[in-house]
């Protein structure tokens, strides 16, 4: 865009230069005509040479000024282009680094998401497995509690039966002891009776 502006300014300067030269030519031509009409004895060759020299000097000055201006603008533009190019290259480098950083972050994000999904799957499997084990343990606990309740009932029943049997045993032992005492008492009476009966027989035999 700036180069186009420089070209337009240079064309404008050239156009002004040409217009000035045309005006100068017209002025010189008018002066020559006037001088020829007014003073035919003047050295026109010398005048034309001086005018040509002035024209060429002015044209050369205008050309040098235009070239100097153009070169100055071109150099300034080149400096701006170099600065802009450096800034552009720096921006490109920064963009490249940012893209690499973004790509690295995206890869890291995908890795984290994969890890998260794997952990969630593992957690679900673990919860399901421990849920099943917990249900099994709960069933086992319930079964053991039922067995303990049955054992308590059996023990209470056996204790009751034991107490009943023990009571029966005690009564039987008491009855046996009573019968033994009774038997022992009857045996003693029987023995006494036998003894008494023997003495009577002897007495009877002697008397006979």
Image (cartoon, rainbow, N blue to C red):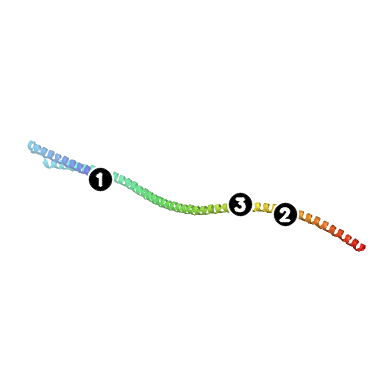
> Mark 2 falls on what kind of element?
helix
Q: In this figure, which residue is indicated by the disc labeled 1?
A: 3
Image coordinates for residue 129, horizontal then vertical, percent: 49, 54
What quarter of the picture does the N terminus occupy? Answer: top left
2 or 3: tag closer to the N-terminus: 3
3 or 1: tag closer to the N-terminus: 1
**Nearer to me, 204 or 9:** 204
For disc 3, the neighbor class at 10 Å (few under 14, some 14 to 19, many from 20) is few
**Nearer to me, 195 or 81:** 195
Establish if 14 lies above or below 199: above
Gap in angstroms between the C-alphas marked 2 and 1: 138 Å
Q: In this figure, which residue is indicated by the disc labeled 2?
A: 172
**Visible in this render: residue 113?**
yes
Gap in angstroms between the C-alphas marked 2 and 3: 28 Å
Image coordinates for residue 80, horizontal then vertical, percent: 31, 44
**Left or right of residue 143: residue 16:** left
* Picture quadrant of residue 194: bottom right
> Mark 3 falls on what kind of element?
helix
Establish if 54 lies above or below 179: above
For disc 2, the neighbor class at 10 Å (few under 14, some 14 to 19, many from 20) is few
Tag 3 near tag 1, CB within 8 Å? no
């Amino acid at each position: 865009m700036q180069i186009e502006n420089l070209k337009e300014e240079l064309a404008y300067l050239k156009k002004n230069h040409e217009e000035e030269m045309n005006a100068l030519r017209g002025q010189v031509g008018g002066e020559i005509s006037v001088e020829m009409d007014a003073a035919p004895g003047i050295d026109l060759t010398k005048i034309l040479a001086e005018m040509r020299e002035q024209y060429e000097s002015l044209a050369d000055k205008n050309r040098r000024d235009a070239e100097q201006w153009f070169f100055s603008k071109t150099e300034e533009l080149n400096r701006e282009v170099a600065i802009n190019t450096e800034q552009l290259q720096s921006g490109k480098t920064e963009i490249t680094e940012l893209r690499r950083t973004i790509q690295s972050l995206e890869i890291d994000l995908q890795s984290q998401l994969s890890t998260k999904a794997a952990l969630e799957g593992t957690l679900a499997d673990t919860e399901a497995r421990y849920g099943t084990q917990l249900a099994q343990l709960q069933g086992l606990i319930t079964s053991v509690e039922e067995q303990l309740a049955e054992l308590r009932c059996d023990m209470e029943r056996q204790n009751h039966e034991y107490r009943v049997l023990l009571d029966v045993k005690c009564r039987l032992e008491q009855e046996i002891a009573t019968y033994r005492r009774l038997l022992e008492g009857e045996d003693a009476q029987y023995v006494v009776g036998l003894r008494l009966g023997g003495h009577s027989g002897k007495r009877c035999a002697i008397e006979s």
